[in-house]
Image (cartoon, rainbow, N blue to C red):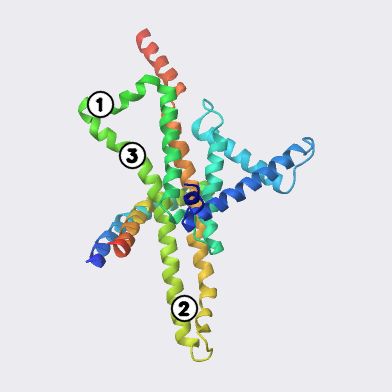
Amino acid sequence: MNILAAAIAIWGVIPSGAGEAWVCVHAIDGISRNPEAANTLRNNMILACALVETTAIYSLLVSILCIFLG
Amino acid sequence: MFDDFLKLELSGEVISSLIVMGIIIILAIIVGIMARFQDPLKKPKGLLFLAELGVDFFDNFTKGMIGTKLSGFGGFIMAIAVYLFLSFIFGLTGLPSPMTNMAVPLSLGLLAFFGIHLVSLRFTKAKYFKRYIQPFPVFLPINMLSMWAPLLSLTLRLFGNALSGYVLMNIVYFALENLSEMIFGGLVSGGWGGIFIAPLIAPILHLYFDLFSAFIQTTIFISLTTIFIGQEIPDEDDALSSNIQLSREGGK
């Protein structure tokens, strides 16, 4: 039962992955339009990716807690 | 009573946290002594140069994010950032990383939380309590709940990142040890067959789960803290420009 709960909880990473792809698509779009801004865009992209990753980390945390403490 | 105090049992993470604080205090004292005896006309070098770079960076960073209305936040942010980064990468020494105990990220989150609310209280005075009944008094319970959202998100982001890295590294070490035992177990006797593969693969993963994670999470934590604090300060320029617009409309 714990494993089932963990498996359901890890589904939360799907929208997070889609969001990260969205961030990357737009950053690359911006870089291809304006290659001089590549450095700023890359830094902001990594920051935004890590921010979007937060929801995935939450679900990973919940599923780890489900396995070990549930 | 005193005996109980001496027999105080601390968890490993808290001891690591104390070690990190000790390192930071010693570094701060050394930098302070170096700064006192430094000729201000000469170029700084070594540790002092690094410290000056850091102080300069954090001063400019907070000035850009918070604005010039509230000065002196650079030290607060720099202390949080240095402690956060060092305690995140402290897991590399083999001792438990302080971040894997819920209390440490929670206390960092509480620091940010109190910073946000105290700054808001200082700048908006009695109007501060008005934000809980906006737009209608019916929204009071919802507003009371959403008050805790920044604290939870800051805490769980750090804790989740550190804990997931720790658990994944442990799983990888376990798997690699078993794999190595299967391959080299026949050649080396005495249970030493498990030590051959992990040193080749684990450092790359440590690079991501400890160093990169620590850097990114530190950046995000201080960015979010300064952005939240900066949000609470009423913007003078906006008020000024809206006044000008109003007067122009009135003039027409």
Question: Pointer 1 indicates a residue of which chain?
Answer: B
For the view shown, which residue lies furthest in the left direction?
Answer: B138
- The tag on residue B135 is 1
Dot 3 and dot 1 residues touching (CB under 8 Å): no
The residue that disc 2 covers is B177
Please, is residue A19 above or below residue B117 in the view? below
Question: Crowding at label 3, few (<14), some or many (≥20) Cα neighbours within 10 Å?
Answer: few
Where is residue B149 shown, x and y percent of the image?
33, 41
Q: Amino acid at mark 2?
A: Glu
Where is residue A37 shown, x and y percent of the image?
52, 46
Q: Amino acid at mark 3?
A: Trp
Q: Give the Cα separation between the discs numbered 3 and 2.
A: 43 Å
For the view shown, which residue lies furthest in the bottom direction?
Answer: B186
Q: Amino acid at mark 1?
A: Pro
Upstream in sequence: badge 2 or badge 1: 1
Q: Secondary structure at mark 1?
A: loop
- Is label 3 or label 1 in front? 3
- Is label 2 or label 1 in front? 2
Q: Give the Cα separation between the discs numbered 3 and 1.
A: 19 Å
Dot 3 and dot 2 residues touching (CB under 8 Å): no
The residue that disc 3 covers is B148
